[in-house]
Every structure is written in structure tokens, then in C-alpha cells.
Amino acid sequence: MTQSLVCPDTVSRVSSVLNRNSRQFGKKHLFDQDEETCWNSDQGPSQWVSLEFPQCVQITQLQVQFQGGFSSRHSCLEGTRKLRGGVSTGFPGFLAHFSIAGSRGGEALSKIVDFYPEDTNALQTFSIPTMEVDRLKLTFEDTTDFFGRVVIYHLRVLGEKAG
């Protein structure tokens, strides 16, 4: 059964927050289901959101609601999965590897999929190749805002808990 995979024990990080005002524009607003709140990044060349789940999950869909004019034309989803013994790995068949500064040991991330959002206020749903992960990074490249800012009202990662 498909469900939201972000829970209170999910650790989230973002690239930046507008004017460092986390109270008004912080990452918590990505998941609060409130139509009046949002995560608003500061300016910069690429913005990102990372999620560390308390257990492995199988992702199947990603839902994002941008503010029109502050979206991304090209986005990339990357992830890792933890094997027994605490060793992380990329995914067979994926050659691109990246790391998150400040993450748990700088573990390698593997590219899962590129996707291309529209510059609209509507909630957009993207099908993701079913993949078991314990960590995701969503990078927003080629933003529609001249200064590189991104505004997201809702971010949902859907799938099932693994195991």
C-alpha cells in the first residue's frame, strides 16, 4: 500500500533558507501539509533537499508543489541503501556517484532518475523506478528564478516501508 514515507524520525536537510529565516521559510514547511507555508531557499546555483529515513523504504512516487516562477526545469533524484553491517551502496546499473557534504560519512549517492517539473503552482507527481533506499537527495538544477531560488509548498515521497 502506497503511503507517505516521511515520518517524524526522518532527518531532513536543505541547501539554504531565505535570509536564514527558518521560522517562516524552513524545511519543516515542506511536510506540514499547510497551504499557507513553504520552504523558500536562498539564492544560489542549485538547491537541494536531503532525507534520511529511519529504515529502508521502497519509493515509487515523488510529489512536489512549487510556487510558479520559483521552480526547477531539471531535477535529479539520488539515493543510497544501507546493507547489513551498516555499509551503504549505490545501485547496480547506475554509474553516477555523488556525496552530500556533512552527511553520514559522505556515503556515495547514486543517481536514480532525472525529471523535469513544469513551472506551475500545481502539485506534480513523478513516477520513480521502484527502489529501496534509506537516504534520498533531490537536487533542483536550472531554476526558473533568475537568482536560483526555489519555493516548495509540498514535498511528498510515496511508497512502502521495506522489510
Image (cartoon, rainbow, N blue to C red):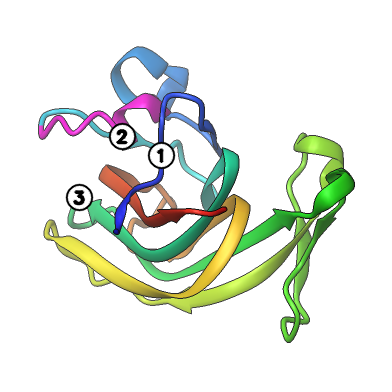
Q: Are marks 3 and 2 in contact (CB under 8 Å)?
A: no
* Magenta residue span: 26-35
For the N terminus, give its image quadrant: bottom left
Label located before the other in sequence (2 or 1): 1
Three-letter residue code for mark 3: Gln
Q: Position of residue 87 (x, y in %)?
A: 87, 50
x then y, percent, for residue 148 = 44, 52
Instruction: Describe the element under mark 1 as helix, strand or loop.
Output: loop
As for residue 29 lying within the magenta part, the answer is yes
Residue 150 percent across, percent down from the top left: 36, 48
Q: Are marks 2 and 1 in contact (CB under 8 Å)?
A: yes
Residue 23 at x, y = what percent?
34, 13
The foreground one among 37 and 43 is 37
Q: Is residue 96 above or below residue 141?
A: below
Residue at the spot of label 1? 6
Among the two numbered marks 3 and 2 on one chain, the one whose residue lies closer to the N terminus: 2
Question: What residue would you read off at disc 2?
Answer: 31
Is residue 45 among the parts visible in the rendering? no
Give me the C-alpha separation between circle 1 and circle 3. Answer: 21 Å
Q: Secondary structure at mark 3?
A: loop
Instruction: Calculate the distance from the C-alpha at mark 2 to the C-alpha at mark 1.
Output: 8 Å
Lateral position of residue 40 relative to residue 9, left or right: left
Q: Which residue bears the numbered disc 3? A: 67
* Residue occupying image coordinates x 28% and y 53%: 70
Q: Amino acid at mark 1?
A: Val
* Residue at the image position 41 percent from the left and 32 percent from the top: 7
Q: Main secondary structure of the magenta part?
A: loop
